[in-house]
Image (tube, helix red, strand yellow):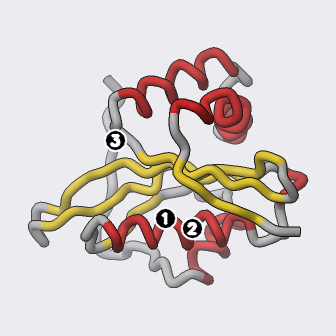
């Protein structure tokens, strides 16, 4: 069965919203398709993120969302790989790997020097994928967050 990955647009919103809602459930958020739709619509309409949509065997199979950023130290563009989700039925078919490959392709084409990502400490399946693709765990910098 073949998998295709393409850049998503507002035309893909009704396909993306349920996928994004399911993704948020993994991070202990409610399954809220209207909130997912509104969030993605705003990102796409404002061109604030890049969404890659995968289809496997003709069905929606997953997505990646990238946010543009910059590295001041390197004085260069980077992309934050914020979200990766593959439907349970499409797992173990290489969909995540194809999405990750397309994200790298996009980063290179835009002149970025790297992709950065983070995942839950408990998400060992994702960690194994990232490490198999050459991503390295940061041991130099400690990341912090502040709720506002």
What secondary structure is found at the residue carrying circle 3? loop
> Which residue is painted at 62% across and 35% down in the image?
12
Location of residue 76 in the rendering, given as x and y in whole percent from the top left corner: 15, 67
Quarter of the image where one finds residue 73: bottom left
Q: Is residue 25 visible?
A: no
Q: Which residue has dot 1 on it? A: 103
What secondary structure is found at the residue carrying circle 2? helix
> Which residue is painted at 72% across and 66% down in the image?
125
Tell me if label 1 and label 2 are in contact, CB under 8 Å: yes
Which of the two discs, 3 and 2, labels the residue nearer the N terminus? 2
> Which residue is painted at 83% across and 61% down in the image?
91
Give the alpha-carbon distance from disc 3 to disc 2, as whole Å: 25 Å
Left or right relative to 130: residue 122:
right
Left or right relative to 47: residue 52:
right
Location of residue 135 in the rendering, given as x and y in whole percent from the top left corner: 48, 78
Q: Which residue has dot 3 on it? A: 145
Location of residue 3 in the rendering, given as x and y in whole percent from the top left corner: 76, 65
Image quarter hosting the N terminus: bottom right
Q: Is residue 13 visible?
A: yes
Which of pointers 3 and 2 indicates the residue nearer the eye? 2
Quarter of the image where one finds residue 19: top right
Image quarter hosting the C terminus: top left
Nearer the observer, 62 or 144: 62
Sort mark 2 into few (<14), some (14-19) or many (20+) by Cα contacts within 10 Å.
many
Q: Which residue has dot 2 on it? A: 100
Which of the two discs, 1 and 3, labels the residue nearer the N terminus? 1
Sort mark 3 into few (<14), some (14-19) or many (20+) by Cα contacts within 10 Å.
few
> Which residue is painted at 62% across and 69% down in the image?
127
Q: Is residue 112 above or below residue 61?
A: below
């Amino acid at each position: 069965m073949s998998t295709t990955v393409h850049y998503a647009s507002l035309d893909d919103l009704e396909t993306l919203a349920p996928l994004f809602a399911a993704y948020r459930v993994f991070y202990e958020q409610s399954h809220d398709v209207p909130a997912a739709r509104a969030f993605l619509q705003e990102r796409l309409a404002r061109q604030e993120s890049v969404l890659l949509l995968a289809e496997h065997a003709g069905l929606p199979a997953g997505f990646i969302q990238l946010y543009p950023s910059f590295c001041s130290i390197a004085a260069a563009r980077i992309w934050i790989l914020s979200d990766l989700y593959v439907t349970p039925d499409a797992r173990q078919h290489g969909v995540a790997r194809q999405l990750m490959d397309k994200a790298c392709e996009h980063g290179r084409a835009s002149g970025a020097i790297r992709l950065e990502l983070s995942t839950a400490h408990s998400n060992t399946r994702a960690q194994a994928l990232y490490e198999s693709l050459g991503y390295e765990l940061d041991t130099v910098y400690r990341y912090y967050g502040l709720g506002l």
